């Protein structure tokens, strides 16, 4: 017989219901960790922070770190408000003495005043700290009592009793030696209500910076009392969340697990609901570096809306297994309605768990999600990164990555998710991956992070790619880049929209290759008016040759799609004028997709040729921009989505700097219109979500709101071809959106055909198709055979501009049936070419 997951760690759990009133119900929980396999994950009732500092080892919970505020949150048994009692017992022992004074004990009644969510309590909660200090003091907050210096730290017991009644509220703390003899005790009376999580804390009384403190093991945890409640829905793991995509009849799904034991042949199963039961779809081995299992299911019916179940069993030491499951929904692919797309980027940890955005996304009910990058920041979780060795770096990354899934898992479980890593995801503030080149930390530091390449070990980069992007449709060309680093660029057809999903970081050249000044950062241009074209040296890469080749293939493929959208991390323009603070004025930033200019122009040209819209993030500044190549507004539109929570602040305040502009939009908002951008591009800024000068707030969510944080909703209508965009503030209520909840200038609607650019010049080609509606049209230069225009016509008429030699070859037809007509050597302007009539 198996132990079912919800019973796994509740060894000895009994629910003791009194015969009298509900008020006296007492809950008892105990865990001796004895049957648990050795592993990093503490179990579904716990959440350990930092992840890499805790483990189950030989039947104990060990805290192996030596920093401050290491904690194991008991997430399922919080203390509830009101009168009653509770008792906490834990056995402890010292693992390492360290050379700084430390503590072990509890924080009780841990909660976050701003967000009642358990996730917020784990990272931002405050409670009553109590326990034992290694300098021989028992403490409840600042109340202390000393105990004898010959106390043995090898094994001891901490007991806490809480008595809350009409007569008064008191906490009693006892320290017992190994033989259970009382060593010291302390009572604190007249305390406030205690309500919130029970947390096991090591060095939990000290503030950072703190290192080389003591570490402890903990065991035989017992919790009981009428003030304890059981919150079953707070359980988290072992399957933490899942992300999926489906495209062209292939379902890809990645299950993300906690760091379970690395058991041989650990298998993860995927099933779908059928009738009264579950039908097995696939079984995959658990990948034990990333703790992921990726499923690929062919012949997927896109019309199916069905629940899926992921299951995993872990062997326990007593010969039994713990069985875990996770249930989500694969939704029916929308084809008869506009596709609602949620665009998110950049989640700085102070906004965790981003509850206002999560609630709004559930209300908006998008058909698909896009997290464009910076799903983690180095400081998320409140502890620093570990760069080396790879194994430690991976666990450190996973601890931060799990915060993303814990926050957004409920949104992702019912809709496809596109997720792509950006620079911070691989622990680099800026990333110019230079095709996967390895870069030494010293080299990177010497050039202030502007040499191309990756600092982190390739094993860690590959875990980032596996956790974030392995569920994307199969890569176009899976050949790894240097160091065996995996790539994921691909395309996805969903809801009649063809998405290209690319990296504008992996192949990009480092600024060190181009900068011509000696002093200072090589990626920041601080001097106004210098000739930026000097940075555009031949051979520099932006998206790399391989992705250009992919996009050239993608742009002509209209099977199942009416519109094209490019998804990448950042904007192909350098817009912000202010970086970091209101005083941080920059003339240019090579981290933007505005540099290098030549490959940037090539991508933007490719996008306008296939009328593609661009969605990106990264900038922490909501922007709606029309690109220019030779002229203002001669290319397509791009939406840079608001950051979920802004950390580093950028602003676009050209009016304040007296930068000239033309053709301000009708809405007449400041800092909009046609401006020459940081890399010399002609940018038409239609809307910008600048933050006010003063963004200070003690409240985390208010700070996010003031810092221009939020999310975007884009509706792609494959029939009208309209693209409607909204950029929505962090604290908005999606059920009651007021005009001020959108950033200034939003909502805004453009049409697919606007992505050619209204100021485009060239030869006009007009088509009338008789016999086929909505055909695809491909226009090649007859001389160079280059594809100049690629579009899915709306109805049977189309007219567009091509810029070529004057003679063109046309291919027009139905990409689904592969029925095509060709016209060779068309010369626009000659008789009979306005329109060119094609009969099927
Ligand atoms: Fe970011």
Image (tube, rainbow, N blue to C red):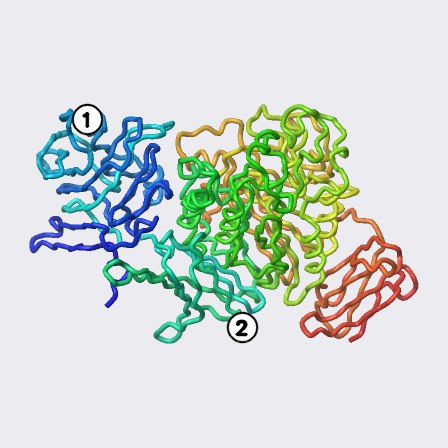
Q: Position of residue 125 (x, y in %)?
A: 32, 37
Q: Is residue 400 visible?
A: yes
Q: Quadrant of residue 620?
A: top right
* Ligand 1 under 8 Å from disc 1 Cβ: no
User: Which label was assigned to residue 59?
Assistant: none
Q: List x then y, in percent, for residue 640.
A: 60, 44
Q: Quadrant location of the N terminus?
A: bottom left
Answer yes or no: is residue 666 visible.
no
Q: Which residue is mark 2?
A: 299
Q: Which residue is mark 1?
A: 136
Q: Is residue 731 left or right of residue 32?
A: right
Q: Give yes or no for contact between labels 1 and 2 (Cβ–Cβ under 8 Å).
A: no
Estimate the x, y position of residue 821 in percent, counting from the top left.
79, 72
Q: Residue at x 53, y 33 (%)?
A: 648
Percent across and percent down for residue 407 are 41, 48
Secondary structure type for disc 1: loop
């Amino acid at each position: 017989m198996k132990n079912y997951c919800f019973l796994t760690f509740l060894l000895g759990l009994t629910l003791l219901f009194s015969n009298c009133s509900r008020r006296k119900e007492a809950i008892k929980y105990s865990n001796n960790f004895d049957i648990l396999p050795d592993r990093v994950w503490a179990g579904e009732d716990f959440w350990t922070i930092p992840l890499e500092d805790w483990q189950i080892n030989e039947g104990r919970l060990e805290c192996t770190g030596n920093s401050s505020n290491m904690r194991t949150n008991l997430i399922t048994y919080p203390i509830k408000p009101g009168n009653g009692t509770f008792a906490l017992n834990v056995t402890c022992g010292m693992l390492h003495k360290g050379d700084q004074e430390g503590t072990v004990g509890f924080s009780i009644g841990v909660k976050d005043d701003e967000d009642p969510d358990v996730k917020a309590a784990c990272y931002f909660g405050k409670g009553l700290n109590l326990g034992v200090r290694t300098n021989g003091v028992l403490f409840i907050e600042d109340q202390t009592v000393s105990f004898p210096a010959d106390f043995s730290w090898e094994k001891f017991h901490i007991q806490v009793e809480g008595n809350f009644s009409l007569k008064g509220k008191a906490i009693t703390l006892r320290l017992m030696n190994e033989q259970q003899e009382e060593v010291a005790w302390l009572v604190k009376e007249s305390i406030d209500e205690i309500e919130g999580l029970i947390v096991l804390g090591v060095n939990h009384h000290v503030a950072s910076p703190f290192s080389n403190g003591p570490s402890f093991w903990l065991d035989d945890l017992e919790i009981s009392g009428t003030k304890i409640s059981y919150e079953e829905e707070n359980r988290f793991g072992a399957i933490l969340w899942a992300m999926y995509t489906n495209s062209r009849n292939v379902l890809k799904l990645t299950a993300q697990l906690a760091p379970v034991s690395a058991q041989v042949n650990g298998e993860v199963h995927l099933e779908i609901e059928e009738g009264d039961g579950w039908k097995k779809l696939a079984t995959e081995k658990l990948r034990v570096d990333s703790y992921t299992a990726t499923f690929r299911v062919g012949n997927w019916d896109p019309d199916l809306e069905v629940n899926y179940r992921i299951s995993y069993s872990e062997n326990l030491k007593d010969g039994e297994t713990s069985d875990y499951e996770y249930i989500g929904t694969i939704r029916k692919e929308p084809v008869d309605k506009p596709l609602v797309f949620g665009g998110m980027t950049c989640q700085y940890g102070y906004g965790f768990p981003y509850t206002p955005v999560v609630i709004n996304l559930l209300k908006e009910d998008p058909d698909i999600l896009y997290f464009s990058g910076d799903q983690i920041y180095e400081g998320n979780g409140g502890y620093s990164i570990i760069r080396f060795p790879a194994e430690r770096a991976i666990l450190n990354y996973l601890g931060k990555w799990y915060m993303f899934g814990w926050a957004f898992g409920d949104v992702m479980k019912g809709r496809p998710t596109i997720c792509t890593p950006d620079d911070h995801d691989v622990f680099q503030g800026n990333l110019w991956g230079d095709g996967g080149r390895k870069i030494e930390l010293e080299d990177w530091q010497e050039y202030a992070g502007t040499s191309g390449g990756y600092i982190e070990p390739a094993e860690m980069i590959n875990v980032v790619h596996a956790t974030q992007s392995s569920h994307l449709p199969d890569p176009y060309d899976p050949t790894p880049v240097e160091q065996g680093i995996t790539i994921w660029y691909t395309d996805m057809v969903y809801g009649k929209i063809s998405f290209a999903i690319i990296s504008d970081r992996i192949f990009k050249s480092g600024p060190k290759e181009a900068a011509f000044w000696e002093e200072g950062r090589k990626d920041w241009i601080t001097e106004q008016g210098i000739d930026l074209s000097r940075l555009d040296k031949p051979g520099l890469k932006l998206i790399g040759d391989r992705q250009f080749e992919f996009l050239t293939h993608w742009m002509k493929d209209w099977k199942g799609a009416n519109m094209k959208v490019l998804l990448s991390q950042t904007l192909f323009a350098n817009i912000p004028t202010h970086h970091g603070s209101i005083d941080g004025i920059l003339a240019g930033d090579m981290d933007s997709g505005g540099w290098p200019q030549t490959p940037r122009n090539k991508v933007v040209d490719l996008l306008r040729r296939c009328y593609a819209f661009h969605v990106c993030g990264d900038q922490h500044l909501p922007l709606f921009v029309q690109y220019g190549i030779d002229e203002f507004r001669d290319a397509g539109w791009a939406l840079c989505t608001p950051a979920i929570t802004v950390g580093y602040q950028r602003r676009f305040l050209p009016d304040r700097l007296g930068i000239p502009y033309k053709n301000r939009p009708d809405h007449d908002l400041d800092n909009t219109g046609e401006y020459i951008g940081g890399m010399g591009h002609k940018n038409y800024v239609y809307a910008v979500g600048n933050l006010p000068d003063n963004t200070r707030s003690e409240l985390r969510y208010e700070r996010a709101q003031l810092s221009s944080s939020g999310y975007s909703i884009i509706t792609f209508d494959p029939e009208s071809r309209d693209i409607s965009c909204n950029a929505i503030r962090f604290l908005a209520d999606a059920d009651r959106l007021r005009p001020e909840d959108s950033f200034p200038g939003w909502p805004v609607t453009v049409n697919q055909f606007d992505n050619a650019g209204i100021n485009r010049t060239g030869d006009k080609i007009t088509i009338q198709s008789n016999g086929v509606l909505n055909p695809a049209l491909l226009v090649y230069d007859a001389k160079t055979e280059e594809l100049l225009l690629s579009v899915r016509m709306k109805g049977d008429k189309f007219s567009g501009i091509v810029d070529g030699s004057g003679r063109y070859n046309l291919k027009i037809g139905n990409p689904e049936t592969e029925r095509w007509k060709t016209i060779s050597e068309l010369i626009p302007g000659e008789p009979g070419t306005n329109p060119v009539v094609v009969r099927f």
